[in-house]
Image (cartoon, grey):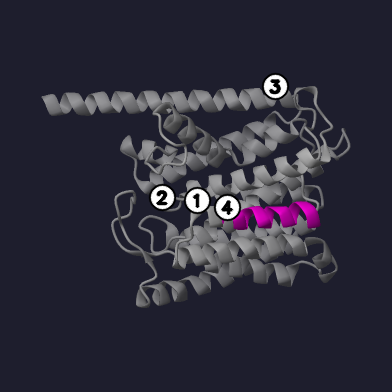
Amino acid sequence: MINPLASAVTSFVISFLIIPVIIKYSLEKNLVDIPGRRKIHKKVTPSMGGIAIFIGFFVASLIWIDISHWRDIRMILIALFMVFFIGVRDDLVPLRPSMKLMGQVVAATILVLLFDLRLKSMYGLFGIYEIPLALSYLVTVFTIIVITNSFNLIDGLDGLAGTMASISLLAFGIWFLLIDDTVFAILAFCMVGSIVAFLIFNWEPSKIFMGDTGALVAGMMLSIMAIYFINTNFNLPADHPYRFSGTVATAVCFIIIPLVDTMRIFILRISRGQSPFTPDKSHIHHSIMRLGLTHSKTTILLGIVQLTYITLAVVLRKLDGNYMLLGVIGFSVLLSVILDRLMIIRLNKDENGVQV
């Protein structure tokens, strides 16, 4: 219990001390995010906060994870190093999307082949368990890429990405702590500490953004935690007090907001006849802000929704996985429909006000 908490404090302090230096240097060297057509912020803002997040996480991990475990997790750190450098390069000199994707695929492949981090079955979903090895590799790489980029896509509001990552990683960290998996608990807590320190400077009005550097690192860490959680939870004894019956559904609940947001914008864009990769302002946070909420209120609201899903997963932990997953999908669709209806009502009110 002490080591994970101490690791969070360590990463917090390191990140907190580094961020002001990055802000000052970025402003001096003009390494900033400039407001534009698709940007919500109104002033130039440093965008290299992910460097502090990663340094805080990495140094705290070196200090608090026992040396005997480094052989086991070194591939995780190598993969995170890869996406870290991809993010730094993209923040400094934008990379082509294909190059960013290629780098992520390489990092994901390292995790799958050298750390054996993979989805090894369907875990009883719809009565399916075993899957071919090749399919296991492909599904795992695809899952890592989807989760990583889903988190990157939601990084569009002061405090939002950091809040979502902190809540999800804290949930994973507490669970790993409860089942005595100290190594993964420390990894999760180290990242939480760094991100919370970053949030102090990223809360509205933001003094710094995490950039692709932070979003890719945090997103890949979430994908690692989710897949490792699925395998670890599934292999626990059936009568274990902290085992969830719905293995996959629970992991989805822990990272639900980025996943639902990505699926929602893809569906909306396709329904309009656009490419699902066309940038726009269709994200959940954009829609909520159009209802009149500020950055901070939107972030708090989505944080509450994320916590609600996690709470439901805990309360319904003995529910059959198939029913739980269907319930999660149904509840998510319902919330999305409600949001769209509120948007229509708000739009009609605005139009009537203009007419008057």
Marks 1 and 3 sit apart, C-alpha to C-alpha, by 29 Å
Sequence-wise, the earlier of marks 4 and 1 is: 4
Residue behind mark 2: 157
Where disc 2 sits, the SS reads loop
Sequence-wise, the earlier of marks 1 and 3 is: 1
Residue behind mark 4: 101
Q: Looking at the image, is 39 positioned above or below residue 328?
A: below
Marks 3 and 4 sit apart, C-alpha to C-alpha, by 34 Å
Looking at the figure, which quarter contains the C terminus? Answer: top left
Residue range corresponding to the magenta coloring: 100-115
Image location (x, y in percent) of residue 315: 68, 31
What amino acid is at disc 1? Ala
On screen, residue 353 versus residue 4, left or right, reads left
> Which disc number belongs to residue 38?
none
Closer to the eye: label 3 or 4: 4
Marks 1 and 2 sit apart, C-alpha to C-alpha, by 7 Å
Sequence-wise, the earlier of marks 3 and 4 is: 4
Image location (x, y in percent) of residue 16: 52, 69
Residue placed furthest toward the left: 356
On screen, residue 6 versus residue 208, left or right, reads right
Report if the CB atoms under discs 2 and 3 are less than 8 Å apart.
no
On screen, residue 325 versus residue 124, left or right, reads left
Sequence-wise, the earlier of marks 2 and 3 is: 2
Image location (x, y in percent) of residue 318: 76, 28
Other residues around mark 4 within 10 Å, as few (<14) / some (14–19) / many (≥20): some
